[in-house]
Amino acid sequence: MEKRKRIPARFQVGDRVEVLDLKLEGHIRTPSYIRGKAGTVIQFCGFFLNPEDLSVGNTSGPVYPLYRVSFAMNSLWPGYERSEDDELCIEIYDHWLNPPES
Amino acid sequence: MTDKHHHEHKHDDHAPLVEEDDAGNLEGQQITDALQALLIRKGLLSAGEVTLEIQNIEAPGTHLGAKIVARAWTDDNYRQRLLANGKDGASELGIKVGEAQLEVVENTPDIHNLVVCTLCSCYPRSILGQPPSWYISKAYRARAVREPGAILEEFGLVLPKGKKIRLHDSNADLRYLVLPERPPGTETLSEQQLAELVTRDSMIGVATAAPPGSSHV
């Protein structure tokens, strides 16, 4: 049996990343409110099958790196009413991230 | 089922708002029932298997999460192992976690954790059972990531000034359990008595654990 392909991890804990707004259709696990936002990788979660593949019955696709990324709440919402220290952590797959545009 | 018919005007003008069958089932339920009946008729599934699976899904409850929290409160080494790997930590207590990974997030004097699944209703079901209806409501899922302070106040939780909120959107493969702060005045309680103070809402993050002597159970 062929070994499952693994998409290489491009990021590590501490990296600044930006969430892409990929124009993909189907089952997407990257909510629209986080697209285009910049955050920091806080955890490498491991390699997982892509829900975008699984939702159409493709169980033989590659595994993708999954990260937990932290965002400042006041960078997500204009006029955020609470503390500037509040943060939101969310899981993002590698192909939805890029290094930030400098 | 309504018969198909032709009109000059738009069908929307007199179509029912929601299609229901004689038993009052909505369309999604009708499709599910039909699929289940077909799978059973073709011998791919038995009714007994469905019943057993429902029982398995409904068997876990908040007592499992509470047991984990009470152990973490009383055993600091266990707490650290649990924070490093939630699934292994649960397994140490004989609790099987069915989800891919369990992330235990700890409340401290400086940080309050809150869990939401904006996309659907991801929740650590194998250790907390089924989520409450408010957790899967669109209102909670939309507002928790936008105005968590207001949400907590609506649940009756006012955080001390300067305490930061850390939100977790449970959108992919991890499931989250909040480890609430141990209430003061509980130093003499047994692990079992401590577990009784750990509420479901405190493990989601919309409440703190109950104070000793409270009658929430």
Image (spheres, grey):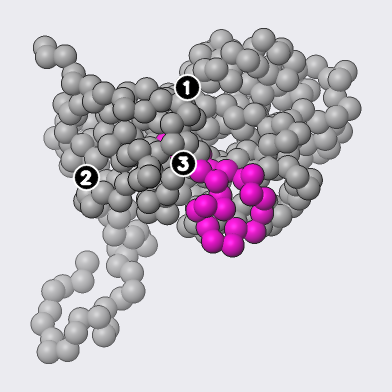
Which is more foreground, mark 2 or mark 3? 3
Write down the residue under mark 1.
B97
Q: Position of residue A41 (x, y in %)?
A: 45, 32
Q: Position of residue B191 (x, y in %)?
A: 75, 17
Q: Position of residue A32 (x, y in %)?
A: 37, 54
Residue extending furthest toward the front: A102
The local secondary structure at tag 1 comes to loop
Q: Mark 2 or mark 1, which is nearer the start of the sequence?
A: 2
The disc at residue B46 is: none
Q: Which residues are magenta?
A: A71-91
The disc at residue B35 is: 2
- Report the residue at 31% width, 25% height from top: A9
- Report the residue at 81% width, 31% height from top: B183
Callout 1 crowding tier (Cα within 10 Å): few <14, some 14–19, many ≥20: some
Q: Is residue B57 left or right of residue B182?
A: left
Callout 2 crowding tier (Cα within 10 Å): few <14, some 14–19, many ≥20: few
In this view of the protein, which residue sits in the foreground, B145 or B155? B145
Write down the residue under mark 3.
A39
Q: For residue B77, what is the image quadrant?
A: top right
The local secondary structure at tag 3 comes to strand
Q: Is residue B44 magenta?
A: no
Q: Amino acid at mark 3?
A: Gly
Q: Quadrant of the C terminus of chain B?
A: top right
Please report, as a chain letter, where disc 1 is located. Answer: B
Q: Amino acid at mark 1?
A: Val
In this view of the protein, which residue sits in the foreground, B106 or B24? B106
Q: Is residue B38 left or right of residue A11?
A: left
Q: Is the residue under label 1 in contact with that under label 3 (CB below 8 Å)?
A: no
Taking the image as drawn, is residue B67 in sight? no
Q: Is residue A74 magenta?
A: yes
